[in-house]
Image (spheres, rainbow, N blue to C red):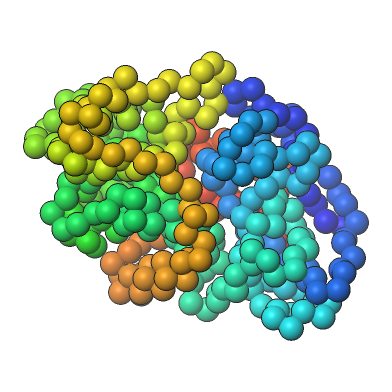
Amino acid sequence: MNKQLLFVKRPTGVADATTWSLVDSPMPTLKEGEFLIKQHYVSLDPAMRGWMNDSKSYIEPMAIGSVMRAGAVGEIIEVNNNPNFKVGDFVSSYGGVQQYAVANGQGCYKVDPKLAPLPTYIGTLGMPGMTAYFGILEVGKIKAGDVVVVSGAAGAVGSIVGQIAKIKGCTVVGIAGGPEKCKYLLEELGFDAAIDYKNDNVRNRLKEECPKGLDVYFDNVGGEILDIALSRLKMRARIVICGAISQYNNKMAIKGPSNYLSLLVNRATMQGMVVFDWADRYGEAAAAMGTWLSEGKLKSKEAVFEGIENFPETFNRLFSGEKLGKLVLKVIED
């Protein structure tokens, strides 16, 4: 049998156990050209909360009754006449929250567990890493000497953004929640400064750490912290809108920035990004980050939890902050 997590109810505010239903389904039968993936790990990302809403977005909302959409990584255990994939290949795909998934190769990427642990392929070498890479380099357009501020800096995307900025010769200030996360940014990732939004006055600390302002603000949280960052822009600053995790579970309207005229005064830009726009260049990013990982310039951290039945409480760690780095759920025994 195949354990599957079905999306059965659109949440209002925080998603809870009633949002999903765990079911045992018969193993699928393969059609010509398809293959069966035994999924080891699934990716838990803030974007998943947006996919549950029945509203226009960059991707179709999830249908009620469908398998919960998610990135995953696993091993091919059966192939029905597909020349590009064979039994024993490991692949990253959007297989969803289930133990076994069927694919035909579209949207699948082969990965090598000998080069990096499987969870890394849905973290630093997966969508979060690609988001960080193209977001800070292509949208943020960083250059050596820039002052870069990253919110959600201890998370899957933010931690990679800050490290890439350091590799490129920038001064990096991370904003995260709690002393443990700030210590991680400073002592393990090499950030120049860390601001604890739970205990510090963010506005005052940002003035202290960026006395002349900031060149790039990479935003993962939205809300009040985005507004504060807008007040500290240098001339021609760039703001990258990657996410707004502080707003995803709102039951009321999203709170937008009131300091937006700072964009006008400083001739700054604020641009949204969706990583799928760079899908044809994922190989380039994976090669660069793989090299940095092997050289010790880039560190990857995954918070791995176990059990497909534990998905609801594990998913909400994204919003409670009870994790470091990339959140991953192991859904099947090796």
**Where is residue 316 drawn, in percent x and y?**
57, 35
Where does the image place residue 169, in percent across and percent down from the top left? 17, 59
Q: Which residue is found at the position 86% from the left and 68% from the top?
A: 30
The location of residue 151, given as percent across then percent down, is: 33, 39
Q: Residue at x 44, y 29 (%)?
A: 246
Find residue 40 and report its horizontal and vertical position in percent.
66, 62
Q: Can residue 205 be seen from the camera position used here? A: no
Residue sitting at the far bottom: 83
| Between 261 and 329, the one nearer to me in the picture | 261
Residue 2 vs residue 162, the one in the foreground: 162
Question: Is the residue 37 above or below the residue 144 in the image?
Answer: below
Query: In this rendering, would 120 be left or right of 219?
Result: right
**Residue visible at 52% across and 54% down in the picture:** 276
Which quarter of the image is occupied by the N terminus? bottom right
Viewed as shown, does residue 262 lie left or right of 52? Answer: left
Q: Is residue 139 above or below residue 51?
A: below
Q: Is residue 251 visible?
A: yes
Q: Nearer the viewer, residue 68 or 253?
A: 253
Which residue is at a point 64% across and 64% down the rendered structure image? 107
